[in-house]
Image (cartoon, grey):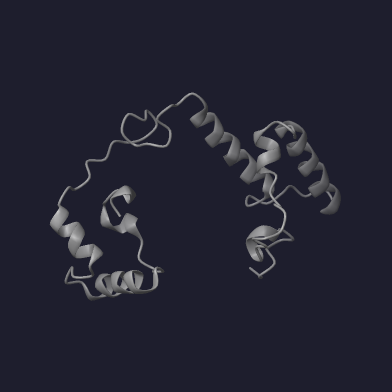
Amino acid sequence: MTSGGQDGYILPNQVNPDLLGPPMSMSAALRFGCLSVRKFYWDVQATYERINRGHPPPSHSLTAQLIWREFFYCMSANNAKYSEMEGNPICIQIPWYKKPDQLAAWEEGRTGYPFIDACMRQLRKTLHGIFTLNSLSAPSRLA
């Protein structure tokens, strides 16, 4: 994949984000109904087929992102607990470990596992790290 995208597909706001410029996303227009999702979908399909001589869009296309957006919107529409795990009917209730001493050891980089400890010390020092929380079998809200 090149820095500009793959198969002619590019997301300008992800390749070189302009944080001070105007938004390059259609999300607000779609969210507030200024742009019909159905019209946007069919316009994207027609434009892609015209440019690519009838070939369907790849699975990582704007259309696929639009479908995921609509899926998650539908999942959240009538679910007051959508942003939470407990009481959310679409979440699997995971019995997380509740061991504060182990969590503190992980946060402070003193687990005894050199790679993990180095990553956590890097995160504490630079506020940037490569260690992922989901490898810990712990909820992200603990960190």
Please tell me in which quadrant of the rendered image residue 73 appears: top right
Q: Tell me the quarter of the image containing the N terminus.
A: bottom right
Residue 110 appears in the picture as rendered: yes
Residue 10 appears in the picture as rendered: no
Percent x, y of residue 34: 74, 33
Percent x, y of residue 139: 30, 48
Q: Is residue 21 left or right of residue 111?
A: right
Q: Residue at x 18, y 70 (%)?
A: 110
Q: Tell me the quarter of the image containing the C terminus.
A: bottom left
Above or below, 7 relative to 28? below
Percent x, y of residue 116: 27, 70
Q: Residue at x 77, y 42 (%)?
A: 45
Percent x, y of residue 47: 82, 46
Q: Residue at x 20, y 72 (%)?
A: 113
Viewer-proximal residue among 100 and 62: 100
Viewer-proximal residue among 38 and 139: 139
Q: Residue at x 23, y 76 (%)?
A: 114
Judged from this view, the residue extending furthest toward the top is 78
Above or below, 113 relative to 83? below
Above or below, 45 relative to 6? above
Q: Is residue 132 left or right of residue 75?
A: left
Please tell me in which quadrant of the rendered image residue 133 appears: bottom left
Viewer-proximal residue among 80 and 42: 80
Total of numbered circles in the picture? 0
Q: Is residue 109 left or right of residue 81?
A: left
